[in-house]
């Protein structure tokens, strides 16, 4: 039986907080924040189950979050969208087009966040525990604050110049 890719350690260094360094007294900031959650999934009116999902944030790409859905096959489905979209979706309807998020309350599962995904291959509605997603997201902002994130990308003037040249 093949190994579950979500159980295997990623090749990149991962931590939610610094772990105390490398033994010489120094502490290195983590490069990423990662957590695996089981999300409830509906692929149609009658198909409901769970899918293990890796939430990953890489400090080198602070604008985005990566969700990897382990579908029980050798392949995985990756979705990348903005960290801001996820943050907003924990409080209100957020997104348009392929990715939409919104908070909800389920009598059986408590506070949740719904994630609707659309692709040429189909659509899915997922439900995640909102407190766990919020805790993971808080750890990403502890690694790279919103203020630091703004300094990582091109300025508005640089984007305007790029678009004007295009």
Image (cartoon, rainbow, N blue to C red):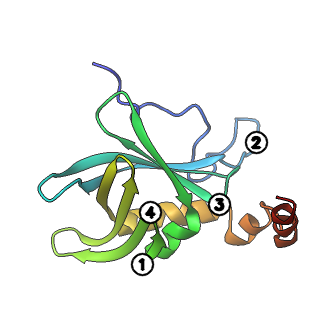
Q: Is residue 118 above or below residue 100?
A: above
Disc 4 + disc 2, Cβ < 8 Å = no
SS category of the residue bearing label 1? loop
Q: Residues within 10 Å of mark 1 (few under 14, many from 20)?
A: some
SS category of the residue bearing label 4? strand
Which-is-in-front pick, marks 4 and 2? 4
Which-is-in-front pick, marks 2 and 1? 1
Which mark identifies residue 134?
none
Judge by depth and name the residue closer to the eye, 77 or 24.
77
SS category of the residue bearing label 2? loop
Which mark identifies residue 63?
3
Left or right, 61 with respect to 9, comes to right
**Sequence order check: which comes first, mark 2 or mark 1?**
2
Residue sitting at x 88%, y 66%: 161
x and y, in percent, of residue 166 in the image: 82, 58
Q: Residues within 10 Å of mark 3 (few under 14, many from 20)?
A: some
Q: Residues within 10 Å of mark 4 (few under 14, many from 20)?
A: some
Judge by depth and name the residue closer to the eye, 116 or 144.
116
- Which residue is labeled 1 in the image? 93
Which-is-in-front pick, marks 3 and 2? 3
**Sequence order check: which comes first, mark 1 or mark 3?**
3
x and y, in percent, of residue 66 in the image: 52, 50
């Amino acid at each position: 039986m093949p190994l579950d890719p979500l159980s295997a350690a990623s090749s990149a260094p991962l931590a939610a907080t610094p772990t105390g360094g490398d033994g010489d007294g120094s502490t290195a900031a983590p490069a990423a924040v990662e957590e695996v959650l089981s999300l409830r999934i509906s692929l149609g009116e009658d198909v409901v189950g769970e899918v293990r999902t890796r939430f990953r944030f890489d400090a080198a790409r602070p604008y985005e979050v990566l969700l990897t859905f382990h579908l029980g096959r050798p392949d995985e489905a990756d979705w990348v969208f903005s960290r801001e979209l996820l943050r907003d979706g924990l409080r209100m309807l957020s997104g348009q087009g392929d990715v939409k998020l919104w908070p909800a309350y389920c009598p059986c599962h408590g506070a949740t966040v719904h994630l609707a995904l659309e692709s040429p291959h189909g659509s899915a509605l997922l439900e995640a525990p909102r407190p766990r997603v919020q805790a993971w997201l808080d750890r990403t902002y502890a690694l790279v604050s919103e203020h630091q994130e703004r300094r990582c990308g091109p300025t508005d003037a640089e984007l305007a110049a790029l678009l004007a040249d295009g």
